[in-house]
């Protein structure tokens, strides 16, 4: 019975908060930073060059190994080291198709290695740039600097977007040559590092206080 009463109390508090926000902003839907994120719904599509390099390199190894093993298998079959129960017509068709498939895999693997080497060089350049941005952010992205000029009394959802936009604008202004997708990715990381842990604690504390008040 106590658990049921607590669940009903929690639902009542959530409904009160929702009604309060909707009353203050009747033309806006309640924002959820996790679902309606400044960073594209919480799903940033930018992939770092280093991650691309790892993916392409892994694919290159897989394709090259499959291709080479397949070619070896075809050669062993043609030289009768491995005997397959095919007649002459079927064998010709089988070996032709398998040879094309495995050679294609091998060529694809070699091409992927060439692409991976190019991505490796690009990843090194990007990592150096990220290190430069991190060093700048450490000194220039603080709560005081970001919150300067912002209304910190706004609702959490609105303040979230304001702060994220401020971080992104500061980064874009300082590093104009950097891809905007990478800036979005870094912005999300910096926001989390600067604010999220503290705000998660503050929200939990405020919520517990309100529960206690209603319980009394």
Image (tube, rainbow, N blue to C red):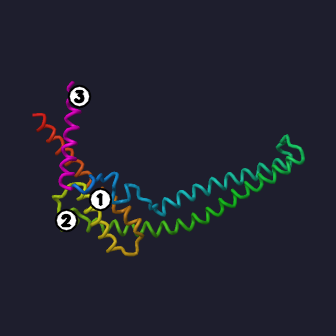
Q: Earlier in the sequence, mark 3 or mark 2?
A: 3
Numbered mark located on residue 150 in the image: 2
Q: Which residue is mark 1?
A: 191
Q: Earlier in the sequence, mark 3 or mark 1?
A: 3
Question: Which residue occupies the foreground of this view, 133 or 7?
Answer: 7
User: Comparing marks 2 and 1, which lies closer to the viewer?
Assistant: 2
Residue 9 placed where, x, y %?
19, 35
Q: Does residue 173 appear left or right of residue 143 in this picture? A: right
Residue 59 placed where, x, y %?
59, 55
Considering every residue shown, the one lying at the far front of the view is 27
Disc 2/disc 1 C-alpha distance (Å) = 15 Å
User: Comparing marks 3 and 2, which lies closer to the viewer?
Assistant: 3
Q: Which residue is mark 3?
A: 4
User: Comparing marks 3 and 1, which lies closer to the viewer?
Assistant: 3
Residue 213 placed where, x, y %?
11, 38
Give the structural element (helix, strand or loop) at label 3.
Answer: helix
Q: Does residue 185 appear left or right of residue 70 in this picture? A: left
Q: Earlier in the sequence, mark 2 or mark 1?
A: 2
Dots 2, 1 in contact, CB < 8 A: no
Q: Residues within 10 Å of mark 2 (few under 14, many from 20)?
A: few
């Amino acid at each position: 019975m106590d658990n049921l009463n607590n669940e009903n109390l929690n639902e009542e508090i959530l409904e009160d908060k929702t009604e309060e926000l909707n009353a203050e902003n009747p033309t806006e839907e309640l924002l959820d930073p996790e679902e309606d994120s400044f960073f594209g719904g919480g799903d940033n599509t930018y992939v770092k060059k280093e991650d691309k390099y790892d993916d392409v390199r892994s694919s290159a190894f897989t394709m090259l190994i499959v291709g080479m093993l397949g070619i070896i298998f075809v050669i062993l079959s043609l030289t009768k080291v491995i005997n397959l129960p095919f007649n002459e017509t079927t064998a010709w068709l089988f070996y032709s198709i398998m040879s094309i498939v495995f050679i294609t895999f091998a060529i694809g693997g070699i091409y992927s290695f060439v692409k991976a080497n190019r991505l490796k060089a690009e990843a090194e350049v990007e990592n150096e740039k990220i290190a430069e941005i991190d060093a700048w952010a450490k000194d220039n992205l603080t709560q005081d600097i970001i919150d300067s000029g912002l209304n910190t009394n706004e609702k959490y959802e609105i303040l979230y977007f304001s702060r994220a936009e401020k971080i992104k604008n500061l980064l874009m202004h300082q590093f104009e040559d950097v891809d905007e997708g990478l800036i979005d990715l870094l912005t999300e990381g910096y926001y989390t590092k600067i604010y999220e842990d503290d705000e998660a604690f503050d929200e939990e504390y405020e919520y517990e206080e309100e529960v206690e008040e209603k319980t009394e």
